[in-house]
Image (cartoon, rainbow, N blue to C red):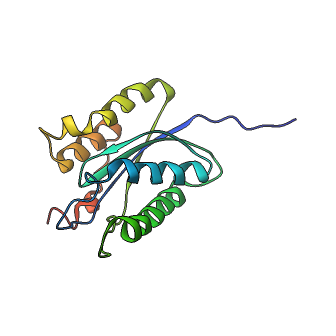
Amino acid sequence: MSSTFTQLYVHIVFAVQEMEKPVLNDREKEIYQIIQKIIEETGHKTLIINGTDDHIHLLVKLSPSIAISNLVREIKRQSSYYINHHILEHHGFNWQEGYSAFTHNRSQVSAVYKFIEKQKEYHRHKSFKEEYLDIDNLNEDDEPDDTIFKYKYQ
């Protein structure tokens, strides 16, 4: 009998398109539950979700059956729909284009989990852009893709 064994841990980060009133802080637990449901319905496992009013971090154990890009597209599509139709009085919520995904081995999962868990505390001292550039520098020495900031920080 053949089988597939994988340990694919990915830290996904994406941002909210700028809005007048932050949405994530007001109903974040509800939004995180919706995102967790989407992740699990697509065959992946949610380890932690957390963020601030302008961005979100996910730590996911991936199933090899669906590409990360497809997972993120579904999370953004379905959660935006939910926020616009069940939380906001007037539609207008969108996630920014793009995302970042950083892979980790099993020995790093605990540290990444703790980092995501302490997001609100962490952002008392650092902006999302500073954090993002730090994360990118920790994972690769390539030039960071800063298009994630094209709406918020121009």
What residue sits 17% from the left and 67% below the top?
Answer: 20
**Above or below, 137 relative to 72:** above
What residue sits 27% from the left and 33% below the top?
Answer: 118
The picture quadrant where one finds residue 21 is: bottom left
Q: Is residue 23 left or right of residue 36?
A: left
Residue 77 location, x and y as percent? 46, 66
What residue sits 23% from the left and 46% below the top?
Answer: 133
**Above or below, 79 relative to 120:** below
What residue sits 25% from the left and 48% below the top?
Answer: 52
Q: Considering the image in quadrants, where does the C terminus appear?
A: bottom left
Q: Considering the image in quadrants, where does the N terminus appear?
A: top right
Q: Is residue 107 left or right of residue 15?
A: right
Residue most extreme to the left: 125
Residue 78 location, x and y as percent? 48, 64
Residue 116 location, x and y as percent? 33, 37
The picture quadrant where one finds residue 62 is: top right
| Number of on-image labels | 0
Q: Nearer the viewer, residue 133 or 141?
A: 133
